Image (cartoon, rainbow, N blue to C red):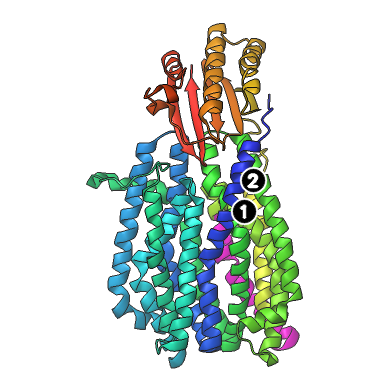
Amino acid sequence: MEERNNRLLNAKLNKYIIPGIMMSLALQLGNIVDTIFVSNLIGVEAMSAVTLSLPVETIVQLTGYCLGIGGSIAVGNMLGKRDKEGASKLFSATFIVTLVVGIIFSICALPAAEPVARLLVSGDDVLTGYTRDYIRVSMLGAPVIGIGLMMVNYLGVENHPELASAYLIAANVINLVLDYIFLRYTPLGITGASLSTVLGFLFAMGIFVLYIRSDKRNLHLILLKPGELGITKEAIITGVPMLIFMAANFVKALGLNTIIMNQLGEEGMAVFTVCDNVLLIVEMLTGGIIGVIPNVAGILFGEKDYVGIRVLCKKMLKYSYILLAVIFVLIMLFTEEITVMFGSGGGELGSHMVQALRIFALCVAPYLWNKFIISYYESIEETAIASFATFLENAVVVLPATLVGILVWKQIDGIGIDGIAAGFVATEIITAVAACIFRKIRHKNTSFYIVPDKNPGINLDFSIKSTMEEAQTVHKRIIEFCQEQGASKSKANLAAVCAEEMTVNIIRFGGKTSNWIDINLCLEDDLCRLRIRDNGVNFNPLEYQYDSEDFDIHGIELVKKVSKSMDYIRAIDMNNTIISF
């Protein structure tokens, strides 16, 4: 029986969407701002150096981003299963590993920057110099960038998406201001663009103090024994798709740079840089919505709330494609203005940029779908499908598709630049189709979601408004349901009494934010499990002790005594209490 109205979950998803967009926007904005300032204040050649530095940027971000994504999803599953101690151990382990790896990068920065730059750029001393100066500072700042990226992912699963957004927004505002100052008023040149990014990540870390002082957090840095660092494998296993994505991104960036420089030269690299930055704009807007899925789906999957997972996915896809339609129209209407913003200066190069960008825009719809399926399958621990799509999109298909596109287009117009865009369109379509086939082979006779249509067991799943009138109906609904299903009369009475006591207390003490309560009673084998979810003030019934007549919550001790077990977690900024009989 499914009667839940999902208003409570929808309200929380809406809370995550705007911070998610802002976080994604801020995460990508640094690269876009650097590219715009460098192209306009130094030149198109320096802009190409920023793109040529992307393989090194990817490696610098690898540990923090992968352990942050993988760790936050694994922690979400642990919190969904009420394992706070394991979640804190995993958080601490990933923090230590990220910091140590970042320090190693810093030590290697000075001796490694020059040879790495010569490996990335062949035969152009000016372009090599720009690339060397940019990546040297990025490597020096690796500990700061790694910890920053790791923390923003944990903040999302820790009920603080607004702090993750605030951190990245602050980091990029600082980056924006310092970019202008360093490039306009100092002789730092392209070094200043890289330095401003690192300093932005560093100075914005003051925002993390708000998280450390929060009474809502479930995760704490704890002292680990030497053998306990092995728990990091939980983050690595869950983060395999992101690890593959980052590794593939390295191969992709290095391969594309080589193909485009050899086939089309600096003009082709400039066109590719503009297209790539437009894709970053699409990513930072729609990716923020899709990014809600890892933060929320992991917890819902841990709770086996498959109905909630479907609500989440449908809502995120709807919002993403509405926003994508607006972006696509804007790209088509203002293509010339976009290329001028990236320093094209018009002329023949500007004309090439405009035509290539309009073709390139056709890839954004399948690109968004691929982004969605990777995030979703990663969150429900179907890492094989997510990894397959990631590797296909970012390594296996994109390089040959781009090369073939350039060679074919050279036969058409004698130039070949539009072949870059055509290659990207083909890549996204092929990936979407291949991932669908791969999923059907691995999970025959299942729907796209793979997880069951309904939550396990026989369920009574309903919502009530936070009013005493509605609370009075809870007891009757549970008794009637248990009678219909032939459940034990004693267990039915216990579940009905406990549900009524808990909902009444939520209504009395939940505060102004409490407006809906979700109640789920699950009969599975010999177990009777009651789950109550509300968006009231942070309250852990397991820690409650009588302290005054003004705050005397009746019934909590009764519920503890009559139940086999009682678990609580504050997740997705909601109180989640599970009582078993």
Rendered location of residue 369, percent (x, y): 66, 56
Quadrant in which the N terminus appears = top right
Q: Residue at x 32, y 75 (%)?
A: 109
Work out how far the residue at label 1 is from the one at label 2, CA to CA, in angstroms.
9 Å
Identify which amino acid the numbered label 2 is placed on: Cys
| Quarter residue 468 falls in | top right
Task: Check if residue 242 falls in the magenta segment.
Answer: no
> Quick check: 211 left or right of 528?
left
Q: Residue at x 40, y 46 (%)?
A: 214
Task: Check if residue 396 falls in the magenta segment.
Answer: yes
| Quarter residue 217 falls in | top left
**Of label 1 and label 2, which has the lower sequence position?**
2
> In the displayed image of the protein, which residue is found farthest to the top?
489
Q: Mark 2 sits on what residue?
A: 313
- Marks 1/2 in contact by CB < 8 Å: the verdict is yes
Rendered location of residue 265, percent (x, y): 57, 88
Q: Is residue 524 above or below residue 273?
A: above
- The secondary structure type at the circle numbered 2 is helix
| Quarter residue 39 falls in | bottom right
Q: Nearer the viewer, residue 442 or 58?
A: 58
- The secondary structure type at the circle numbered 1 is helix
> Quick check: 71 left or right of 350?
left
> Quick check: 380 left or right of 130?
right
Number of other residues with Cα within 10 Å of mark 1, as a class: few under 14, some 14 to 19, many 20 or more: many
Rendered location of residue 514, percent (x, y): 57, 34
Rendered location of residue 364, percent (x, y): 68, 65
- The answer to whether one can see residue 378 in this image is no
Q: Is residue 377 above or below residue 31?
A: above
Extent of the magenta region:
388-417
Q: Nearer the viewer, residue 188 or 76?
A: 188
Image mark for residue 372:
1
